[in-house]
Image: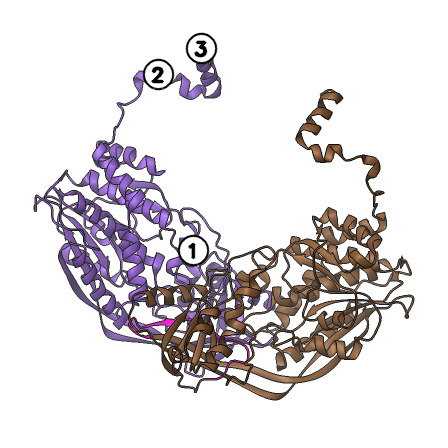
Chain colours: A brown, B purple
Amino acid sequence: MKPALLAALLISAAPAIAQQSVASLPPPVVTDPRIAALRDNARDNDRYAWDVVEGLTTEVGQRLAATEAEARARDWAVKKLTAMGFANVHVEPFDMPVWVRGTESAEIVSPFPQKIAVAALGYSGSTPPEGITGQLVYFDSVDALRAAPDSAVAGKIVFIDHHMIPTQDGIGYGQFGAPRRQGPTIASLKGAIGVVVRSIGTDHHRNPHTGVQYFTDGAKPIPAGALPVPDAEQLVRILKRGQPVTMHLTLVSQKSEGGHSGNVIAEVPGRDPNAPILLIGGHLDSWDLATGAIDDGAGVAITTAAAKHIMDAGRPLRTIRVVWFGAEEPGGFGGNAYAKAHGAEKYAIAGESDFGADNIWRFATKLSTTDPTTYEALAAALAPLGIAKNDKGEADGTDVGPTIEAGAPWISLNQDGTRYFDVHHTPDDTLDKIDPMQLRQNVAAWTTVLAILSGGIESGPKQPKRR
Amino acid sequence: MKPALLAALLISAAPAIAQQSVASLPPPVVTDPRIAALRDNARDNDRYAWDVVEGLTTEVGQRLAATEAEARARDWAVKKLTAMGFANVHVEPFDMPVWVRGTESAEIVSPFPQKIAVAALGYSGSTPPEGITGQLVYFDSVDALRAAPDSAVAGKIVFIDHHMIPTQDGIGYGQFGAPRRQGPTIASLKGAIGVVVRSIGTDHHRNPHTGVQYFTDGAKPIPAGALPVPDAEQLVRILKRGQPVTMHLTLVSQKSEGGHSGNVIAEVPGRDPNAPILLIGGHLDSWDLATGAIDDGAGVAITTAAAKHIMDAGRPLRTIRVVWFGAEEPGGFGGNAYAKAHGAEKYAIAGESDFGADNIWRFATKLSTTDPTTYEALAAALAPLGIAKNDKGEADGTDVGPTIEAGAPWISLNQDGTRYFDVHHTPDDTLDKIDPMQLRQNVAAWTTVLAILSGGIESGPKQPKRR
């Protein structure tokens, strides 16, 4: 094709671009080839992350906050992080209440007797062992429940419906999570004897999605459970027949004070111990229904693997601190305890991985305003992984949140959440849900971030690789 | 394009076709427009099938053979078939043993304590209420178990693995079903105290796939359970660590004689009561873990809807008999009882729908050899639905099998089984797994078959439509 013809085509196809003068573009940002090599090696060859998440989910399994299983997970973490060559590996314990589920079941007593699958929400009140029986009353949203007169609810079992669909950024979790988060309190204040919600999930499997809720505003704890999506839809069909529907609900659980949890901390020591720290991590605890592979075995695995790749390359100027936070699920206890102990330290960045293990598709950071040069360097180095910069992004993360509140600059690497809420908080959160290729893309992204923010990595005598 | 050029292109693109003389082709088979209209109306507008399967799964739910739930399902069926306008609606009862599951759980005791999901297989032996504890011994196939010395198995809990993958024709169900079907007997004969098998399934959800097995060759019943695929994979990972693995297994169940089931029979009476009958149907019972939507609520719904479309069109020459067979899952009791009572009657065809509700993609029939003209008429009329003729196909179907054995000519309409074994016999076999559009394609295919084999439909005074 003749150059003149090509130029004409470009102008007609994309006038806006063609009219922008090349001279007015900012200078090109070129990624340091050593950083690009670290990134590409992690993307193509990382085994650390799989090794961590496979080991944790296989050798410990579920690790509910403040239970003996979470304590075993901390022991496992200390052993693993030490074996990988991290420094200052230690546990920082804290106290918290402990909630554990017991026997659970639900049945429609009439008009069409049948079993319905159910799981208690965190901090649910307990039924007596023999369960409770009540008439169901339906609401299609928390707002509909809030608007209802007490007389429509008192003495009944409330059923709150919704219709969450999958999204890449997980935006629905806030709005459609309301039945789980506020539903039980509102139902209790109106005199309900129990509450069941359609799971905050986007799948169609017989898996209830558990999750935390608190009884606030003086509401008395009542039994509160999540129904799998197919069971919620079945209940809607049954209710549509127009006859009164009676449910028998057994949700035995136990809450007690005096539980213990802890954060597991490990470091890649920086050459300058006074330089601001790079804080990354995920949470060690999981819900009790599965082995917590995507929530959040993957998060501790990804961030630990990234730190390990820097360690393999040499000594960073800044210390990298990896935290496997305890007790995130019941309310961010580990993140609060960490900030209380370490919030006043100086940080170069704080970020966490807690949204599964699918590809990271965009990132955002406070550095976009405070340090635009570094922001553009991050953007350029992450782009080959398919990650776009998101100028409008915000800080997120339950665990690093309190430390960010205390002043640490933040970075958010957003994973694709399209299939996250199919599995989130269900019995299905198992290792097979992690795609090893996408897991490596995550490791590559975090390795890139650490390398760019490290202050420079000085190669030293190679440490023996331990796996 | 010039005709000469088109011809040249055709010849170069497909020489084999181009070289076949048009004169040597058989005469074209043209579908009677009235039959095509019936077919297309069913494909585009059928609501009967959805109505049946939605009603049965919602208002009855699970309907395990020989239980009170299956009896409720028969009552529902009689009411429904009568309301739809069928004639001679009645139940033909038979006796059989009844097996029901009780409390079930499994845990790894050591080296990595954790829960494993499990469901008993049909006719499993029962553990005591407190369960049994034993060391696991792994086999990657039934053949490996068969080859093992008794001493490797005696006193242990056998775990049989396999690797079934999805296929369109479901071919793997035979071979990879061996761990479920023969595994428990072989394990028992070698002195095992229990057996768990990787579910005969192709999904990755925490759903066990139950199913029937019998203890033969004098084997003593032992507890026999199915593990969901993720749990079986977890067990393999745990075993690969090389330490002895101890499992605690609770599979309480109860088997007793003196149960009752029955076949529900309904007819569209033919104008000639002596003409051979068109026998179609599916099975009414389901496993107890779900509402039995694809297995086999869909089957009774599809065949019933097809018969209803003929009824709506007028009176066929031949009687159409629809059977909702009882107790198929525990071993084809309904099909055997039917053949015992009716096997000697004269049939024009016998066929059943019992492979889900996804699109029918091919068909086969004995008529291909005994009545090639009708075979070609069927092929021509089914082709617009995307259904290919399968000259090498065979009779299938547990329920119509004994009647075919007794001499009835058979027809098999094969559904796409690619996703069938994701759901088959699991808690996930619920209404949401049925795609209404594919369900209608099934109804259209069966309507077409009935119309062609009806001997002619005479329009009569329209009966009032009842839904």
- State the mark number for residue B4: 3
In the rendered image, residue B63 lying in the magenta stretch gets the answer no
In the image, A216 versus B137, the foreground residue is: A216
Q: Secondary structure at mark 2?
A: loop
Q: Are marks 2 and 3 on the same chain?
A: yes
Residue occupying the point 91% across, 66% down: A271
- State the mark number for residue B421: 1
Q: CA distance from mark 1 to mark 2?
A: 45 Å
Tell me the magenta residue range. A109-126
What is the x, y in percent for residue A175? Answer: 55, 65
Q: Nearer the viewer, mark 3 or mark 1?
A: 3
Q: Can you say which quadrant of the picture contains the N terminus of chain A?
A: top right
- Residue located beneath label 2 in the image: B21
Residue occupying the point 79% across, 62% down: A308
Q: Nearer the viewer, mark 2 or mark 3?
A: 3
- State the mark number for residue A172: none
Asked whether, in this view, residue B2 is left or right of residue B362, the answer is right
Q: Can you say which quadrant of the picture contains the C terminus of chain A?
A: bottom right
Q: Are marks 3 and 1 in contact (CB under 8 Å)?
A: no
